[in-house]
Image (cartoon, grey):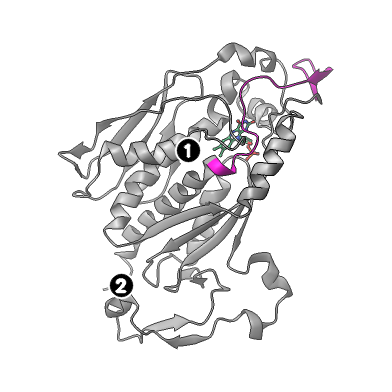
């Protein structure tokens, strides 16, 4: 089974290679009647485009989406949404040198070991460009979740530091990694499907499916390992006026929490606090410095990667992190409707 589809009830399939005719997404399972415009999708895609600050590739494409199905008169139809973006601005010849050798830190060698062939132009399917399809899915999921007042916000943990570091290494043909922080607000308590579909497990799987992601932490994260229970436990308090209190079933008392070391998840279920997590991105693998690799015949060769590459993916990945979180939450919101009588 291919690995290009994601989700159970709210599903996303992304398709396309970096230098093929088009990339895009099919989103299925979005309920009918969600207000959705092409502008919402376009403005989310604009956040993924290379920006200033010296961290991004110089491949500047308009990323103009076209909705082929699933929306009528500004509302979702409940049918599959297909959205494509035609690729423009591809300089495939920049990648000729990669046809017969493998980039250190990239997927080239493993991909060929699995499939026996690869589209080397722009990294093919392993390109960061694939994430545009995820952003389309995220725009649809966000529109659905806005009806439940659920919102997503991602930012750079060390923005200034990252811009400075990127500028310093760009001139040396090198790259850097970084950390993206994400907060989801407005989740009702009880979201998540224990035991294998826990909220944190689902979010972690989604984040680790993004290229260059190497780690995720929820709330106190790895620091929790060095804390006492008395420090890490978030005291439970009467809820005050949290908006979802009226929705709690079974007469369960409304509650709030004194702190958020849990990151908003307990037992794999949302606890009504903001869902908070951090995602670690490694340095971009394609770098303009000479590295050691081998060619198709197994001979050692030096490689200096050409083409237009990001120095740090984090600024462009903010909207991708939000998108994957939104798709997971949309899926769990739909699954939650089957949780009890
Ligand atoms: C938004 C985004 C942009 C990216 N841009 C580049 C790039 O310009 N050059 C590159 O080599 N890798 C880039 N990557 C990272 C590769 O896609 C990723 O490192 C590669 O697929 C190998 O997968 P892995 O790092 O998860 O092992 C980007 C990733 C994302 C999410």
Query: Which is more toward the observer, 52 or 194?
Result: 52
Which type of secondary structure does the marked residue at label 1 adopt? helix
Q: Quadrant of ligand 1?
A: top right
Q: Position of residue 259 (x, y in %)?
A: 54, 78
User: What's the magenta region?
Assistant: 292-315
Q: Position of residue 208 (x, y in %)?
A: 58, 48
User: Which residue matches tag 2?
Assistant: 340
Residue 48: image tag: 1
| Residue 282 visible, this orientation | no
Q: Position of residue 326 (x, y in %)?
A: 41, 53
Query: Which is more toward the observer, 267 or 219?
Result: 219
Q: Is residue 147 above or below residue 61?
A: below
In whole angstroms, how far apart are the C-alphas of marks 2 and 1? 39 Å
Which type of secondary structure does the marked residue at label 2 adopt? loop
Q: Is residue 189 above or below residue 125?
A: below
The residue depicted at 33 percent of the width and 32 percent of the height is 83
The residue depicted at 15 percent of the width and 39 percent of the height is 73
Q: Specify whether residue 295 is painted magenta.
A: yes
Query: Which is more toward the observer, 183 or 126?
Result: 183
Q: Position of residue 61 (x, y in %)?
A: 46, 25
Q: Residues within 10 Å of mark 2 (few under 14, many from 20)?
A: few
| Label 1 CB sits under 8 Å from any ligand 1 atom | yes
174 left or right, relative to 130: right
């Amino acid at each position: 089974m291919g690995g290009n589809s994601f989700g159970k009830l709210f599903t996303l399939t992304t398709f396309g290679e970096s230098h093929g005719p088009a990339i895009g997404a099919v989103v299925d399972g979005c309920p009918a009647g969600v207000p959705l415009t092409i502008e919402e999708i376009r403005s989310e895609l604009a956040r993924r485009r290379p920006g200033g600050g010296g961290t991004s590739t110089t491949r500047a494409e308009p990323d103009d989406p076209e909705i082929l199905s699933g929306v009528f008169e500004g509302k979702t139809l409940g049918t599959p949404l297909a959205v494509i973006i035609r690729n423009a601005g591809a300089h495939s010849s920049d990648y000729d040198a990669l046809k017969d050798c493998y980039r250190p830190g990239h997927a080239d060698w493993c991909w060929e070991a699995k499939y026996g062939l690869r589209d080397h132009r722009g990294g093919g399917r392993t390109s960061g460009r694939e994430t545009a399809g995820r952003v389309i899915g995220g725009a649809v999921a966000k529109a659905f979740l806005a009806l439940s007042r659920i919102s997503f916000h991602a930012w750079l943990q060390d923005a200034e530091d990252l811009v400075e570091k990127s500028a310093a290494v760009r001139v040396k043909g090198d790259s850097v990694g970084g950390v993206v922080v994400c907060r989801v607000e407005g989740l009702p308590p009880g979201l998540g499907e224990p035991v294998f579909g826990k909220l944190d497990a689902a979010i972690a799987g989604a984040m680790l499916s993004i290229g260059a992601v190497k780690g995720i932490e929820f709330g106190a994260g790895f620091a929790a390992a060095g804390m006492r229970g008395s420090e890490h436990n978030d005291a439970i308090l009467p809820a005050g006026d949290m908006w979802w209190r009226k929705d709690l079933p079974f007469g369960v008392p409304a509650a709030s929490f004194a702190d958020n070391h849990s990151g908003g998840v307990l037992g794999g279920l949302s606890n009504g606090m903001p869902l908070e997590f951090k995602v670690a991105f490694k340095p971009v693998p394609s770098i303009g410095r000479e590295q050691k690799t081998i060619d198709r015949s197994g001979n050692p060769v030096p490689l200096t990667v050409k083409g237009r590459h990001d120095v740090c993916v984090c600024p462009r990945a903010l909207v991708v992190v939000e998108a994957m979180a939104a798709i997971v939450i949309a899926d769990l919101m739909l699954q939650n409707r089957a949780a009890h009588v």
